[in-house]
Image: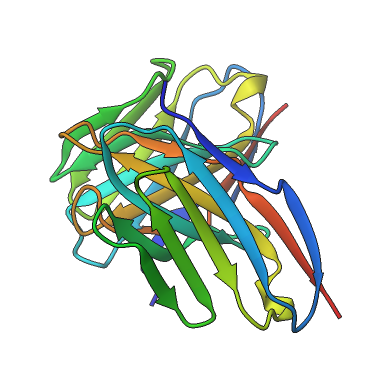
């Protein structure tokens, strides 16, 4: 059964600090892995998409890594800002024409002054 | 300009009613989706249309029927609404299947 597990479930950090969110998956066959940011009351916004051959991708202060061998991904946020407070969702897409998307339950990040 | 727009933003209705949620995208994308986010904030895909054809149809009660009159629109019609249908429904679009998806603001449906 395809699964995506995210940790931690929630995280509180001080403004300016760095943090790393984890995503482990058991989706097969693998097509791509995406990280989304969802602000409260808004729709998710894509941060990164990584395919099998990519092991790191950056989007401003967000850097995602992918280890396809261990089936793990991380999202590193540098110099956090109050506006980073949101839920971060890891989504893994299956390949081979199935297009099945498996969602993690998200990590709720709170950045406090 | 709003890329993916849904209407209404809020919908409160009684059990047993039939309701529709509309979605339009002006990005020229070929693929559109409907997602459901429950009270625990867990997102789950419901349907996906590619060039007006149904591609993904997850295990969803047949009371839910998507309709795509053209590539820019994907509406969701729900018959005989139940309490458990209360959730936030997101529409999204992407250039093609398996590419970056852009989400609408969501429609918060409350069934009373």
Residue at 35% x, 62% y: name it.
Answer: A55
Count of marks, rendered view: 0
Residue positioned 67% across, 63% down in the render: A86
Quadrant of the image occupied by residue B95 = bottom left
The N terminus of chain A sits in image quarter: top left
Q: Is residue A16 left or right of residue B23?
A: right
In front of the other: B3 or A55: A55
Specify the quadrant of the image occupied by residue B50: top left
Q: Using the image as rendered, state which of residue B19 and residue A34 is in the foreground.
A: A34
Instruction: Name the residue: 67% across, 83% down.
Output: A79
**Where does residue B38 sit, x and y in percent of width and height?**
62, 35
Q: Position of residue B53 (x, y in %)?
A: 15, 36
Left or right: B60 with respect to B70? right
Residue A45 in view (yes/no): yes
Instruction: Pick out the residue farthest to the right.
Output: A113
Seen in the picture, residue B102 relative to B89 is either above or below; the reply is: below
Seen at 47% across and 58% down, the residue is A35
């Amino acid at each position: 059964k395809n699964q995506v597990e995210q940790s931690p479930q929630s995280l509180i950090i001080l403004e300016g600090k760095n943090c790393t969110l984890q995503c482990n998956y058991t989706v097969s066959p693998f097509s791509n892995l995406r990280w989304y940011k969802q602000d409260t009351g808004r729709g998710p916004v894509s941060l990164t998409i990584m395919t099998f051959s990519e092991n790191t991708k950056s989007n401003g202060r967000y850097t995602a890594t992918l280890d396809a061998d261990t089936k793990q991904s991380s999202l590193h946020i540098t110099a956090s800002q109050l506006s980073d407070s949101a839920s971060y969702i890891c989504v893994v897409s299956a390949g081979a024409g199935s297009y099945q998307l498996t969602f993690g339950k998200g990590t709720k990040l709170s950045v406090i002054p | 300009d709003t890329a993916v727009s849904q209407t209404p933003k809020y919908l409160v209705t009684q059990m047993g009613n039939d309701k529709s949620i509309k979605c339009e995208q002006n990005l020229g994308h070929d693929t559109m989706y409907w997602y459901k986010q429950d009270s625990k904030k867990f997102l789950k895909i419901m349907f996906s249309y590619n060039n007006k054809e149904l591609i993904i149809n997850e295990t969803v009660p047949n009371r839910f029927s998507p309709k795509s009159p053209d590539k820019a629109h994907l509406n969701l019609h729900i018959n005989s609404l139940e309490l458990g249908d209360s959730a936030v429904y997101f529409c999204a679009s992407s250039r093609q299947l398996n590419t970056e998806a852009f989400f609408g603001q969501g429609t918060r449906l409350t069934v009373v």
